Image: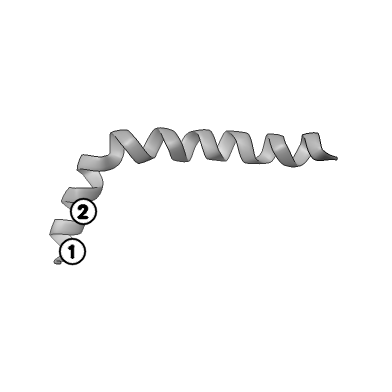
Amino acid sequence: MSITDAVGLALLLAPIWFPLLAVACILLPNRNTTTK
């Protein structure tokens, strides 16, 4: 698998993993603060 193939695949899957990544970044700090 070449780098260009990996970049193309990442761009195709961006609508899937980008929202998940954003949600994870938002939820994880909130969980840490609520568990305290």
* Residue under label 1: 3
Neighbor class of circle 2 (other Cα within 10 Å; few <14, some 14-19, many 20+) is: few
Task: Tell me the colour scheme of the image.
Answer: one colour
Task: Residue 19 in the image: state x and y as whole percent.
Answer: 41, 33
Q: Secondary structure at mark 1?
A: helix
Quadrant hosting residue 27 = top right
| Figure check: 14 above or below 9 | above
Q: On the rendered image, what quadrant is the C terminus found in?
A: top right
Tell me if 32 is positioned left or right of 12 in this view: right
Name the residue at 70% across, 34% down. 30
**Badge 2 is on which residue?**
7
Question: Horizontal placement of 9 versus 34: left or right?
Answer: left
Provide residue 34's location: percent of width, then percent of height. Answer: 79, 34
As rendered, which of 4 and 23 lies closer to the eye?
23
Q: Quadrant of residue 1?
A: bottom left
How far apart are the two marked residues, 1 and 2, measured between alpha carbons? 6 Å
**Residue under the point 30% across and 33% down:** 15
Q: Position of residue 6 (x, y in %)?
A: 20, 57
Say whether marks 1 and 2 touch (CB < 8 Å). yes
Q: Amino acid at mark 1?
A: Ile
Amino acid residing under circle 2: Val
Residue shown at 29%/39% (left/top)? 14
Q: Position of residue 11 (x, y in %)?
A: 22, 43
